[in-house]
Image: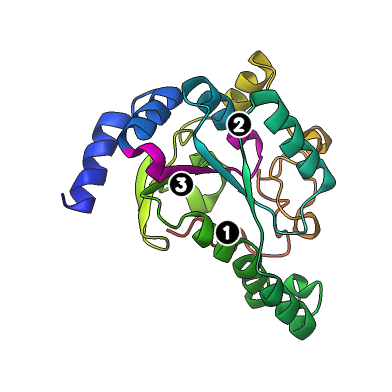
Amino acid sequence: MNTTHHIDNLNEHWTSLPAHEILAKALELFGSKITFASSLGAEDQVITHMLSLIDKSTNIITLDTGRVFPETYDLLHRTVNRYGMAVKSYCPDTSQVEDMVNTKGINLFYESIENRKLCCHVRKIVPLQRALQGMDAWITGLRREQSVTRTGLRVVEWDSTNGLIKINPLLEWSEEQVWEYIKTFNIPYNKLHDLGFPSIGCQPCTRAIEKGEDLRAGRWWWEMPDSKECGLHSH
């Protein structure tokens, strides 16, 4: 089947469905060839909870860049214990990190956008590509209202970077819906969210935001809003 036609067909039938039904249909369609890439953010915790109710054997991966917050590691531990689901960590290649740091410096990302994207490539993109090998689809926690770079997303998309289908079940959810769901089901979440961190990535590239700021204003705050993606979600 033509990939574009297939994706259009899935969007036609899935877009109006509740998130848990989108996930159920995705798992049924792709079976063991689908994985959920969790950053352990609030949205991803919602999806993990939903997956635990559908199929606890679902493939779940997370990227351990080596520079995440201690609170993120704590949340990973609490999440695995809560749901009894395996979450496989993928780390960057040691030699690539050593070469980058020894050549560019330990905090190279502050020096230029080029350096920051190099760091994201080594610590995130390459490990994700390894995690997605052999998969036909992957699930993300992307939401349309998160940033200007995500307004044109669809529930089902073709990920040309990784050569597989990407599914965004929470695309139309609001921030309020996410937190209402978390509180209703007592879902474990990162304690940094209570300290003004709506979006949490690597520690040196994430700060708390002020009231009224964009949800992703604390990510790579020294860059322009339209460039604030690490490359995991290229459009």
Query: Residue 46's quadrant in the figure?
Result: top right
Between the C-alphas of marks 1 and 2, the distance is 29 Å
Amino acid type at image mark 1: Glu
**Element type where label 1 sits in the image:** loop
Measured in 3D between alpha carbons, the distance from the residue under mark 1 to the one under mark 3, in whole angstroms, is 13 Å
Quadrant housing the C terminus: bottom left
Q: Measuring 61% from the left and 31% from the top, which residue is drawn there? A: 85
Which residue position is annotated with label 1?
Answer: 229
Residue highlighted by disc 2: 85
Dots 3, 2 in contact, CB < 8 A: no
Residue shown at 26% from the left, 45% from the top: 7
Of the residues tagged 1 and 3, which is closer to the observer?
1
Rendered image: mark on residue 151: 3
Q: Which residues are magenta?
A: 30-45
Q: Is residue 34 magenta?
A: yes
Give how far across and how far down residue 142 sits, in percent. 52, 42
**The disc labelled 2 sits on which kind of residue?**
Met
Q: Is residue 59 left or right of residue 27?
A: right
